[in-house]
Image (spheres, rainbow, N blue to C red):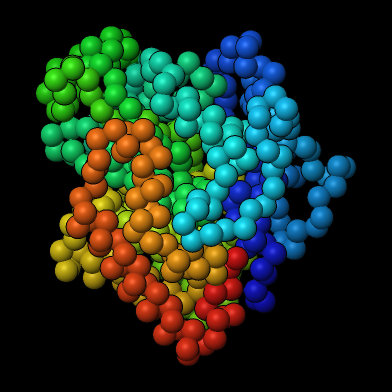
Amino acid sequence: MPLRPRAWRAFTGLSLPFLVGLSAPSCERARPEAESASQPSAAEMARPPSAATLPTAPIPPPSAAATPAAPAPPPAAATGAEPQRRLRLEPDEPALRLDAERFPGSAFFVQQILSDLAVARLHGLKPVGSTSTVFRASLDAPFRAAFKATTRARRRGPSAEVAAYRLARVLGLSNVPPATLRRVPKAALQRELEPRAAASWPQIAERLVVDAQGEVEGAAIFWIDGLRDLPIEERGARETALRALRQGEDIPESLALLLPQLSNLLVFDWLIGNTDRWSGANLKGDGAGQLLFIRDHDFAFGKLSAEQEQRLFAPLARSERYSRGLISRARALTPEAFERELAKDPGFARTPPRIEAAALAAVFARRDKLVAHIDGLVASHGPDKVLPFP
């Protein structure tokens, strides 16, 4: 079938305004009245759009009759923020604007999410981790969070989650859930545990790393409601998708929107050294199966063996179609720019370094190998064929 760039543009950008309404999460608690003038109301946040708002290709210009409006952003006068505008990207500045970007599929501004993740009280903790110690938590905020604790077996895990989010920001990938480091008293974790989970506390407590102040550091991560397994999680469907990323292959109708996101996922996992993507339950999307969320990165930024690196690069080596914007930003990224972005997280700024210098250097060594691979493809096929996605 012919390539349909307009369809890809709708979902590979992932920060376009009409993506806001794909699947707004439920709001368990209303925000305080003092904030109601500057944030969307709980009713607005919880209102799901109709299926008609999902874009198809080609996408017609939006009209008031065809597409319900997303919740309006707070006025500039109320928040002090500048009106939303498209910025010219520099290699060392984030590709996303915290004050102007909503997380895809939700009604929440990224700045709001990060602020609440850092300080809002966690309660109703439910253990949900299988290989790591993770709690699903309610917040004194209109959304939920995952709290991924530092454990003896996974000391790097929370920092890796936040570092992955910060790298995604500078690369312009908006479908990685916001994450920030924070400390929670061990006693509060026990006190706020769901009653049904109380019996498991001794085993949980034994795994935790607790500092001299009796606190546990962890990554507070935006909880995405309504996650569903994507078809490409299954091996056969994944192989079909990977074949479609090769030059000369047709793009199946069913993959027209997911394929560019899969390409971005392969690039991102390679850069952060994430070897855990295909172990199961780590490839999920929205209820419509059109939006892929890149999540679960506590295995990232580790030391890879030669065999692990070869296995991680294998699907990328088979791929021959990429996002022009993502590759451009990856090519321009410097270690200094990444470190500045990491320092914007309070936890990283408080007691650096959280990721070993060798692990950061490995990111850029893998970046160079990626760029060399793509340059070779461009020399053979031309930039328009190798970089067809926005």
The quadrant the N terminus occupies is bottom right
- Left or right of residue 72, residue 316 in this image: left
Q: Is residue 337 above or below residue 187?
A: below
- Left or right of residue 256, residue 152 in this image: left
Residue 77 image offset from top left, x and y in percent: 73, 27
- The residue shown at (45%, 66%) is 332
Q: In this view, does 200 lie above or below 308?
A: above
Please tell me which residue lies in front, 339 or 383: 339
Q: Is residue 70 in view from this perspective?
A: yes
The quadrant the C terminus occupies is bottom right
Image quadrant assignment for residue 389: bottom right
Residue 214 image offset from top left, x and y in percent: 18, 17
- The residue shown at (62%, 58%) is 88
Residue 198 image offset from top left, x and y in percent: 24, 12
Please tell me which residue lies in front, 143 or 120: 120
Residue 35 image offset from top left, x and y in percent: 62, 16
- Left or right of residue 153, residue 389 in this image: right
Please tell me which residue lies in front, 256 or 33: 33
- The residue shown at (81%, 50%) is 62
Q: Is residue 278 in view from this perspective?
A: no
- The residue shown at (55%, 65%) is 325
